[in-house]
Amino acid sequence: MQRRLAWLTLLFVAYFTLLSSGPDAEPRFSTPFAPMMAIAIAAGIDRYLSSRSDQKSMRRGAATGQSGRGAESSS
């Protein structure tokens, strides 16, 4: 379910980026979407980086015999 939402968001951002960067694009049509696209891009970058850090901590935990969540799992 989340994968489908991620693809739809990616297609939305790519479509409006390409549409607003064309030779006939006027700023008055692309400006209202700029904050929305910036938020979507920032959320995607944040999610990507957090998933990478989760994967690294899981690998580190597997190598040391722990569960990968660090201090939460040691109690």
Image: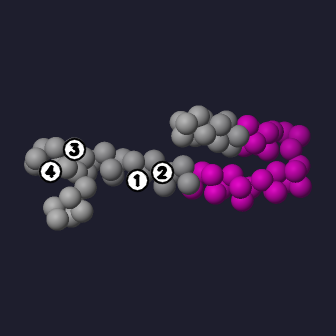
Are the residues at dot 3 and dot 1 in contact (C-beta closer than 8 Å)? no
Image: 27 above or below 21: below
Q: CA distance from mark 4 to mark 2?
A: 24 Å
Assess disc 1: are there few (<14), some (14-19) or many (≥20) residues with their C-alpha within 10 Å of its C-alpha: few
Nearer the viewer's eye, disc 3 or disc 4?
Answer: 4
Q: CA distance from mark 1 to mark 2?
A: 5 Å
Image: 6 above or below 54: above
Residue at image x 64%, y 42%?
9
Q: Earlier in the sequence, mark 3 or mark 1?
A: 1
Answer whether residue 14 is visible to the viewer in this image: no
Q: Which residue is mark 4?
A: 66
Are the residues at dot 4 and dot 2 in contact (C-beta closer than 8 Å)? no
Q: Earlier in the sequence, mark 3 or mark 4?
A: 3
Residue at image x 36%, y 47%?
52
- Residue 71's tag is none
Residue at image x 22%, y 51%?
68
Q: Which residue is mark 2?
A: 47
SS label for mark 4:
loop
Are the residues at dot 1 and dot 2 in contact (C-beta closer than 8 Å)? yes
Q: Which residue is mark 1?
A: 50
Chain part drawn in magenta:
15-42
Q: Picture quarter containing residue 28?
A: bottom right
Nearer the viewer's eye, disc 4 or disc 1?
Answer: 4
Q: Which residue is mark 3?
A: 59
Give the residue type at disc 3.
Arg
